[in-house]
Image (cartoon, rainbow, N blue to C red):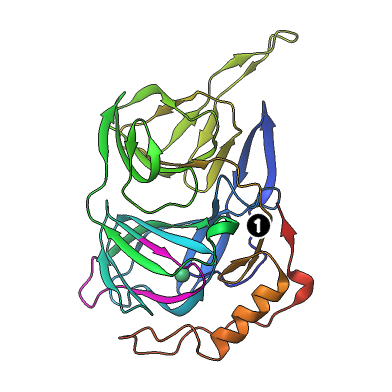
Amino acid sequence: MSTRDADVDAVGPPVVNEGLELTTARLATVGNQTLRRLLPLRQRRSVGAWCFADHYGPMSVDGVGMNVPPHPHIGIQTVTWLLAGDVLHTDSLGSEQLIRPGQLNLMTAGRGIAHAEVSPATHDPQLHGVQLWVALPDAARTTAPGFEHHGVLPFMRADGFDVTVFMGSFGGLRSPATTFSDIVGAQLTARWNLRAPVALAPSFEHVIFVVSGWARVASVTKDTDTGMEQGPVALEPGNMLYLPPGREDVTVTAADETTLILLGGVPLGEPLLMWWNFVARTPEEIAAAVAQWRDGEFGVVGGYAGEPLAAPPLDPRRLIIRA
Ligand code: MN
């Protein structure tokens, strides 16, 4: 997946309650797809090291299929996670990998890589998934590029949830995927109508969002002064709840078969500069990456029939650094 512009803030003021923030996704267009862009937020460029989150579908890709032409990345890992359908990844290292639901495609861009994502020639007519980016901490962001596929990931059944951990650690499980900071990326699916606590790492900040179904999150609390009850937050596809560090759990009420994504990590504490598909620290680094892409220095993505994506015009006024 590829972002068209740097102005990727989700819309709507956050609802703040005891540090919780409910935000609404911005609708964005990538290629022939409309999707819900949940991260980054204007007030929050990253959650742990997670700095980008798109939720797309479920939608029909019968016939034409998904088609994201070759484009470059620096400074991040891209995390591809599907709920339905299949996507073929190719990159400038020569990787070629089909991914299906429950599997992880993890591309470490490091100092630079290019990739394309398309529906395979014969593909599932439905597509549903999330495209996530993890910012590389400063010490790791010029690491060598790499690609890994994990067909089997840690799984458990806990408190009525089917839990798959695709990145980092959660509930005593650890994903085999390469990470460069303490993070979690997990999928939780309710096996029936349930209300259960989900354990959180207190040193992590988190976001939680629904990709299918509906849920209510956080507990009902009573204001001791007014007697008013603060209800739980309703989640459905297109919104997201932020939970600050310091929590040991969050109570989730979910309908049968609802699927939630939990992302989190130790706050990154580094300013991120995001432009197009590049995450860096200075405008000079972004300008250098744009020039390298223009000059073909990211290498060739083999097997793709069409033209690569061109970088949009670089407008220094839109390069904004925020922690
Ligand atoms: Mn990409």
The magenta span reads: 106-124
Give the residue displayed 31% in from the left and 49% down from the top: 176
Residue where numbered disc 1 is placed: 9
214 relative to 40, above or below: above
The location of residue 97, given as percent across then percent down, is 26, 69
Give the residue displayed 38% in from the left and 80% down from the top: 92
Circle 1 crowding by C-alpha within 10 Å: few under 14, some 14–19, many from 20? some
Give the residue displayed 75% in from the left and 70% down from the top: 318
- At label 1, which amino acid type do we have? Asp
Any part of residue 63 in sight: yes
Label 1 element class:
loop
Query: Given the current orientation, which residue lies at the most extreme left position?
Result: 122
In the foreground, 265 or 306: 265
Q: Quick check: is 119 in the magenta stretch?
A: yes
- Please state if 248 lies on the left or on the right of 230 as rendered: left
- Please state if 87 lies on the left or on the right of 289 as rendered: left
The location of residue 186, given as percent across then percent down, is 38, 42
Q: Quick check: is 276 in the magenta stretch?
A: no
- Please state if 120 lies on the left or on the right of 310 as rendered: left
Quadrant in the rendering for residue 252? top left
